[in-house]
Amino acid sequence: MSYFIRESTLNDVDSVSQLFDLYRVFYKKESDIEAVKCFITERMEQGDSEIYLAETSKGQIVGFTQLYPLFSSTRMRRLWLLNDLYVEKSFRGQGISKALIESAKQLAYRTNSCGLLLETGITNTVGNQLYPSTGFEIQSNSNFYFWTNNRT
């Protein structure tokens, strides 16, 4: 089946929310479609992120990627966090993930950013094969630390 990649709009909130909820469940979060709709709507309305969609020729949204803008102080340029990437299970293996990543790279070129940053779990075997195949490199010369706010 053919598909194309496009930027999302507020008209896509319901479709994006369905996929985003599946994405969260994949990462062992509880399904909460109403909270997801709120979150996605806020991101779109506030311009906090860029969301690209994979849409079939029949109008079905089957994948998405969401990127957040960051800045690199040492490079003094924008940097994009490729935070979310998901393709509906029955559409995997058709190059959709690679096409979504390519749309993220095009965003980086258009915005003159210094690159894309992403994180995936060590046990995500598919992701750990996908990302190097699209030009991403593991950064072995730095440590990645995370602090969790336990007050929320």
Image: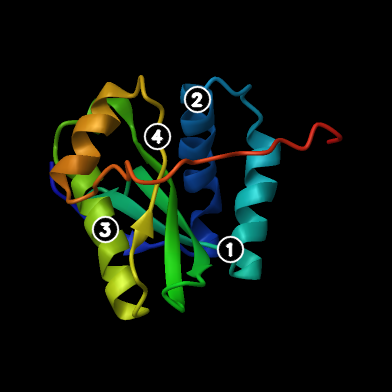
Q: Is residue 61 visible?
A: no
Tag 1, which secondary structure?
Answer: helix
The residue tagged 2 is 27
Question: Do the numbered discs 3 and 2 sit on residues whose CB atoms are within 8 Å?
Answer: no
What's the CA distance linking mark 3 and mark 1? Answer: 17 Å
What's the CA distance linking mark 3 and mark 4? Answer: 22 Å
Vertical placement of 79 versus 3: above or below? below
Q: Is residue 118 visible?
A: yes
On screen, residue 152 versus residue 71, left or right, reads right
Amino acid type of disc 3?
Ile
Closest to the camera, between mark 3 and mark 4, is 4
On screen, residue 19 versus residue 112, left or right, reads right
- Please tell me which residue is depicted at 34% across the width and 24% down the height of the picture: 124
The residue tagged 4 is 120
Judge the density around disc 2: few (<14), some (14-19), many (≥20) Cα neighbours within 10 Å: few
Amino acid type of disc 1?
Met
Residue 102 % position (x, y): 22, 58
What's the CA distance linking mark 1 and mark 4? Answer: 24 Å
The residue tagged 1 is 44
Question: Do the numbered discs 1 and 2 sit on residues whose CB atoms are within 8 Å?
Answer: no
Amino acid type of disc 2?
Tyr
Quarter of the image for residue 93 reads top left
Give residue 5's mark: 3
Amino acid type of disc 4?
Thr
What's the CA distance linking mark 3 and mark 2? Answer: 24 Å
